């Protein structure tokens, strides 16, 4: 009963050259991933297992190459957000690596998980019973405890009895027990520390009742960076591995981590030398008055480009000059090129990244759109090819 879907949604194509029919691309540096993995190892010491999260198509950056690199760096288990991510890991040729899926499914989806040999999250009895009845042999699962975040999981107050009950079910092998306590500031850290301690106590009570499991896990990026204390033997970081801060500015030192997203680029497909005869209405949602040349890139809403919030001006870099974005439609964006000398169709446009003197960061895009960095990347997820710098 494997799913009949063949296409992987949100999986970017890896290319070595740009496609002239739609010359947009994203460049990632896997050397930065190595660097971040080692920085993380330094913080954690040698004994804590790192089970990196590649959820949401590796936070929009594409699962295949990243998962392969993480395994070569020593990750023993890959944490996925969905069945889709898990298929991408298996599709990357990683047939033997442990794969856990943090997101869940209807019970009827469990046979697909079993066919792919990936570990589902058991967060209620319905899923546990589905695994137990569909599995034809002992199958590994992770159990999720809701320690206060209020999403998936057995509520921590009732988790002890629930987990002992699941452990007795036929064909279920509990590989791991985990929880998730993300936070972004010092107040959140207090809350997370208190909840993590409750989770440690639960694991200890289960151990005293004779249930010990190979993997216990409570910390993601914010917990690791902030130094939340736990007695678990694994962590599941995502954001920091990709060099994306998971905490508010200034809460922790982030200087040991580099962004693996180096640039997002496009090319001008059209330049209009002067704006004299342009209809002002085209630009009515934007504050900018056009006095000179304008240019068009094929990077519109369908590519994940989003208009700035009122009062904000989004910018891109053309020939070393930061220029305002005038409008964004479904297929295209129009740039004000009046301050660029001799712009021509074919010129490169930096949507994110640096020129010699200018820089546009993911944080800039998020600020202009009044959203999170994660959101900006998820909007673009899989919508343009990836160039990979090794
Ligand atoms: C998203 C997620 C993580 C990773 O979170 P980051 O903040 O990206 O490190 C870990 N565990 C669970 C259960 C998650 O959902």
Image (cartoon, helix red, strand yellow):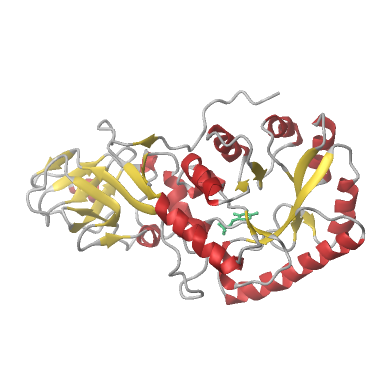
Asked whether residue 183 is in view, the answer is: no
Q: Percent x, y for residue 39?
A: 50, 64
Asked if residue 338 is positioned above or below residue 89 in the image, the reply reads: below
- Point 56% across, 73% down: residue: 185
Outermost residue, front side: 46
Q: Percent x, y for residue 200?
A: 78, 66
- Point 84% across, 65% down: residue: 204
Quarter the N terminus occupies: top right
Asked if residue 285 is positioned above or below residue 117 in the image, the reply reads: below
Q: Quadrant of ligand 1?
A: bottom right
Q: Quadrant of residue 32?
A: bottom left
Q: Percent x, y for residue 386?
A: 38, 41
Horizontal relation, residue 266 to residue 39: left or right? left
Most foreground residue, 108 or 144: 144
Horizontal relation, residue 3 to residue 307: left or right? right
Horizontal relation, residue 233 to residue 8: left or right? right
Most foreground residue, 81 or 137: 137
- Point 46% across, 75% down: residue: 250
- Point 20% across, 63% down: residue: 357
Most foreground residue, 115 or 50: 50
Asked whether residue 51 is in view, the answer is: yes
Q: How many marks?
A: 0
Most foreground residue, 8 or 365: 8
Q: Quadrant of residue 339?
A: bottom left
Q: Percent x, y for residue 190?
A: 66, 76
């Amino acid at each position: 009963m494997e799913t009949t879907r063949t296409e992987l949604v949100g999986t970017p194509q890896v290319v070595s050259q740009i496609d002239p029919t739609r010359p947009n691309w994203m460049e990632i540096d896997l050397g930065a991933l190595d660097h971040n993995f080692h920085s993380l190892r330094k913080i954690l010491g040698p004994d804590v297992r790192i089970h990196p999260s590649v959820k949401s198509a590796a936070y929009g950056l594409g699962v295949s190459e990243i998962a392969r690199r993480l395994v070569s760096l020593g990750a023993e288990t890959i944490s996925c957000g969905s069945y889709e991510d898990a298929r991408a890991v298996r599709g990357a040729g990683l047939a033997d690596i442990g794969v856990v899926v943090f997101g869940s499914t209807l019970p009827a989806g469990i046979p697909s998980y079993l066919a792919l040999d990936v570990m589902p999250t058991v967060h209620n009895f319905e899923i546990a019973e589905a695994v137990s009845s569909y599995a034809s042999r002992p199958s590994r699962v992770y159990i999720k405890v809701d320690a206060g975040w209020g999403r998936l999981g057995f509520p921590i107050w009732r988790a002890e009895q629930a987990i002992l009950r699941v452990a007795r079910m036929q064909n279920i092998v509990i590989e791991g027990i985990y929880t998730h306590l993300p936070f972004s500031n010092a107040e959140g850290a207090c809350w997370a520390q208190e909840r993590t301690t409750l989770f440690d106590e639960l694991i200890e009570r289960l151990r005293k009742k004779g249930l010990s499991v190979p993997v216990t896990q409570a910390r993601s990026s914010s917990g690791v960076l902030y130094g939340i204390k736990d007695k678990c033997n694994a962590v599941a970081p995502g954001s920091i591995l990709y060099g994306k801060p998971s905490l508010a500015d200034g809460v922790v030192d982030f200087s040991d981590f580099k962004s693996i997203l180096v640039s997002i680029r496009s090319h001008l497909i059209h330049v209009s030398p002067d704006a004299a005869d342009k209809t002002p209405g085209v630009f009515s949602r934007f504050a900018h008055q056009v006095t000179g040349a304008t240019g068009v890139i094929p990077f519109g809403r369908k590519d994940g480009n989003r208009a700035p919030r009122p009062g904000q001006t989004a910018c891109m870099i053309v020939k070393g000059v930061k220029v305002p974005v005038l409008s964004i439609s479904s297929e295209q964006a129009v740039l004000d090129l009046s301050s660029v000398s001799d712009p021509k169709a074919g010129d490169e446009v930096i949507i994110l990244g640096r020129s010699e003197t200018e820089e546009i960061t993911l944080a800039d895009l998020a600020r202009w759109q009044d959203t999170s960095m994660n959101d900006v990347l998820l909007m673009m997820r899989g919508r343009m090819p990836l160039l990979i710098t090794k």
